[in-house]
Image (spheres, rainbow, N blue to C red):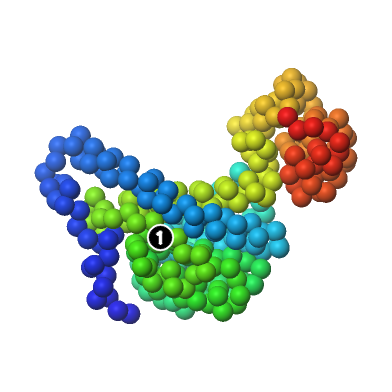
């Protein structure tokens, strides 16, 4: 592994604006961090065309029965895993439909396994264990853009025929050469030199937010801006599901509750029942024919969406 160019990476260089970080009053220190953070969203905006390509590729993978698989080490891997585990409760996905693979295994989420990122074969073993196929899409997250674990995983994924996306926070990143779609969000020097859990980590989180959310919107798991496939597994989410049905249909809360009960707690089905004046079975069939999208389901049932 060649480390000769590591020091020249933008994420590794020293930020001259924070050269006296240890001498700053706390308010000045926090202001400096906030100033730097404001540049991250603009850096992500410049990468939107490539992020859009990744969303389209992810949608295509899920529609053909594949999975969205995040792959990373350290902070990058934890961010991918965090996004993956939030998809089932938010979008009603199966646990295996969006996955996060972390160098060093799941335990590395809590306790750092720093050496694991240097092993490209570790990612190959993890992807083989996950049963990677050409129907899947692999998103390799590497703030530096050169993490061997991610490079090895992307190389293997391309060999299998899976769709591949890389996310890096430096330009001309090595991982970009191993992905069909290369997303480079250039965040520059960190407030704390080399600490890519800061701006680079924030950028990766924003990209993952966009990738999963936009993909699920395209998959029909959102109606308007409502998470209609939410899993109502606690009191807060039960209340949210009721409010979602009320907001989507204009129904009275008590009618929304009754429809939810008839729909087995599934907000999407309850919404189609109320807007289409359908039974649960009729609503479920309309959703099946509409690929899970409420607007298509209502059109198939001859009802106008609101």
Whole-percent x, y for residue 94 in the image: 67, 54
Whole-percent x, y for residue 194 in the image: 26, 59
- The kind of secondary structure element at disc 1 is strand
- Tell me: 41 left or right of 3: right
Answer whether residue 261 is visible to the viewer in this image: no
Q: Which residue has dot 1 on it?
A: 184
- Tell me: 253 left or right of 199: right
Q: Nearer the viewer, residue 42 or 229?
A: 42
Residue depicted at x 67% and y 50%: 219
* Quarter the C terminus occupies: top right
Q: Nearer the viewer, residue 172 or 129?
A: 172
Circle 1 Cα neighbour tier, 10 Å, few/some/many (<14 / 14–19 / ≥20): many
In the depicted structure, whether residue 28 falls above or below residue 3: above
* Quarter the N terminus occupies: bottom left
Whole-percent x, y for residue 189 in the image: 25, 55
Residue depicted at x 34% and y 62%: 170
């Amino acid at each position: 592994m060649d480390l000769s160019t590591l020091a020249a990476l933008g994420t590794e260089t020293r930020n001259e604006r924070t050269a006296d970080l240890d001498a700053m009053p706390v308010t000045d220190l926090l202001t400096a961090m906030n100033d730097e953070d404001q540049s991250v969203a603009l850096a992500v905006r410049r990468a939107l065309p490539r992020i859009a390509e990744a969303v389209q590729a992810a949608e295509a993978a899920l529609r053909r029965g594949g999975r969205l698989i995040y792959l990373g080490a350290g902070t990058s891997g934890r961010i991918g895993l965090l996004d993956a585990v939030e998809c089932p409760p938010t979008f009603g996905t199966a646990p295996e439909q969006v996955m996060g693979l972390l160098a060093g295994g799941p335990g590395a989420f809590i306790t750092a396994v720093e050496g694991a990122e240097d092993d490209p074969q570790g990612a190959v073993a993890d992807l083989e264990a996950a049963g990677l196929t050409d129907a899947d899409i692999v998103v390799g997250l590497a703030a530096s853009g050169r993490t061997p674990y991610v490079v090895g995983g992307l190389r293997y994924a391309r060999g299998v025929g899976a769709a591949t996306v890389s996310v890096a926070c430096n330009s001309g990143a090595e991982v970009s050469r191993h992905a069909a779609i290369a997303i480079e969000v250039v965040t520059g020097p960190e407030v704390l030199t080399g600490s890519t859990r800061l701006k680079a980590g924030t950028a990766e989180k924003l990209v993952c937010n966009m990738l999963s959310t936009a993909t699920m919107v395209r998959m029909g798991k959102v109606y308007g801006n409502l998470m209609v496939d939410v899993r109502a597994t606690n009191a807060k989410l039960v209340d949210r599901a009721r409010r979602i049905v009320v907001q989507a249909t204009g129904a009275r809360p008590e009618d929304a509750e009754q429809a939810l009960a008839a729909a087995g707690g599934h907000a999407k089905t309850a919404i189609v029942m109320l807007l289409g004046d359908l039974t649960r079975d009729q609503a479920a069939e309309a959703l099946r024919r509409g690929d899970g999208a409420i607007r298509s389901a209502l059109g198939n049932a001859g009802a106008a969406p609101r």
